[in-house]
Image (cartoon, rainbow, N blue to C red):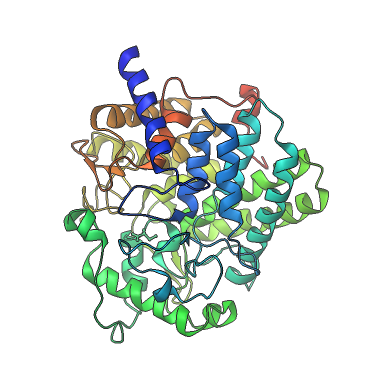
Amino acid sequence: MNLQSINRCDQRAREILQKNDRGNYTVPTDGLYPFQWNWDSALVALGFCAFDPDRAWREIETLLSAQWDNGMVPHIIFWKDDEGYFPGPAEWGTGTSPKTSGITQPPLAATIVRELLDRSKEDFHSRAVPIVEALNRWHQWFSDARDPDGRGLVAIIHPWESGRDNLPDWDAPLCHVDTSGVGTYSRRDTQHVHEDERPKKLDYDRYMALVQFGRENGWDPEIIARDNPFWVADAGMNAILRRAEHDLVDLAQTLGLSRIATQARARAQRLDAGFEALWSEQLGGYVSLDLRHNEKARTLTAGTFLAFYASNTPDRHARRMLDTFHLWSKKVRYGVPSFDPTSELFDSIRYWRGPVWAIINWMIANGLERNGHAELAVRIHKDTQSLICNEGFYEYFCPLTGRGMGGDAFSWTAAAWLAWASPNAGHSGRSAADRNQVPGA
Ligand code: DGY
């Protein structure tokens, strides 16, 4: 990659964020996703931090301004009406102001806020205090509403909460979802993107049945914990929350918020211990666990490698996951595929059943580096650079050919470029030794 093409990509990435900027929040991409999405926004903030730190903080503040009274931070905030997306506010029926969906998404925000504080030259400490307080309420909600038995594993109640919508992990748990009352509806996503690259109709029927279940039960956390037909511990969600709790401890200490540091530390310790229940000795990796039916997923996903991002991993487990990583690398041209390329369920173009996602690559590389596997992190970094430079800022990429797919001019791909993949990406102000330290280690 020469200097000219790097500068061109930097410029294009900034333009994408500016074009998708709606003032106080950023849409993931024009058309397909016309509102504010939770984990997209967190990543977008990291992208903005490279050239407009004030705007980065505002993205997080806007997201948290939609926090529910019970602490949940919703996965979509419908700041404006838009007929181009389904299901909209009427289907979710949450009755909140602003209008939101009734579920959450992976809580990346604490990790990103820690990065923002590290990377910003200006002093944002006083701005960070209310943010950290809101994040603590959100994390506590995860513990109360999604781990009511205190086993150190949080459940998702809809595949959309994982952010990895049509992962094969959900196929078995979704079989228990009754779709007989769903009726007819009109999808909008396939009007923007080719249907081969999106979830199938049966998946969508089940997604809609789960939305109906939540709406009919007033999104009541107790009823949902007891009766929701989908109640699954996702390895990705749990890894991201673990990391976020450790980062919240660090943030709270930096800001002198000792009560929050104590609470977050206790939750982090519980999650660290609980995570081991996701280990599959047979597959040699962390997998999702259907908590309703006590069944583990039978395949590994990119979420498996998020164990490195989460925190420290027992050596024996790390070795087995690295073996898998090397095996996968032989099967694809570009890493990291979202799903096991040796499985018969692998589909190189269908959303989360195979394609590579730049933001997941950032998280995996970040985790590998912190756990002392810098050479693998460099490989992922290079693959991501090539994919974006050759194809553009697509939502996801084919791991076999590199073709860009899904939405184009995608905000979080632009953010991943500016914050990490670009050779000019900003680095944290901390020392390398600090950066590489695994939280809680
Ligand atoms: C969608 O509509 O495809 C989204 O992933 C839901 O968040």
The answer to whether residue 316 is above or below residue 204 is: above
Whether residue 438 can be seen here? no
Q: Could you tell me residue 87's position as x and y percent?
A: 35, 69
Among the 4 quarters of the image, the one containing residue 180: bottom left
Q: In which quarter of the image is ligand 1?
A: bottom left
Q: Residue at x 18, y 58 (%)?
A: 195
Q: In this view, does 105 lie to the left or right of 123?
A: left
Q: Could you tell me residue 272's position as x and y percent?
A: 62, 53
Q: Is residue 165 left or right of residue 252?
A: left
Q: Could you tell me residue 65's position as x and y percent?
A: 61, 57
The answer to whether residue 190 is above or below residue 47 is: below
- The furthest residue to the top: 3
Between 349 and 120, the one nearer to me in the picture = 120
Q: Is the C terminus in the top left, top right, bottom left or bottom right quadrant?
A: top right
Whether residue 191 can be seen here? yes
The answer to whether residue 95 is above or below residue 48 is: below
Among the 4 quarters of the image, the one containing residue 385: top left
Q: Tell me how many marks there are.
A: 0
Q: In this view, does 164 lie to the left or right of 216?
A: left
Between 323 and 359, the one nearer to me in the picture = 359
Q: Is the N terminus in the top left, top right, bottom left or bottom right quadrant?
A: top left
Q: Which residue is drawn at 72% across and 50% down?
A: 130
Q: In this view, does 151 lie to the left or right of 78?
A: right
Q: Which residue is drawn at 55% across and 24% down?
A: 427
Q: Could you tell me residue 162's position as x and y percent?
A: 44, 59
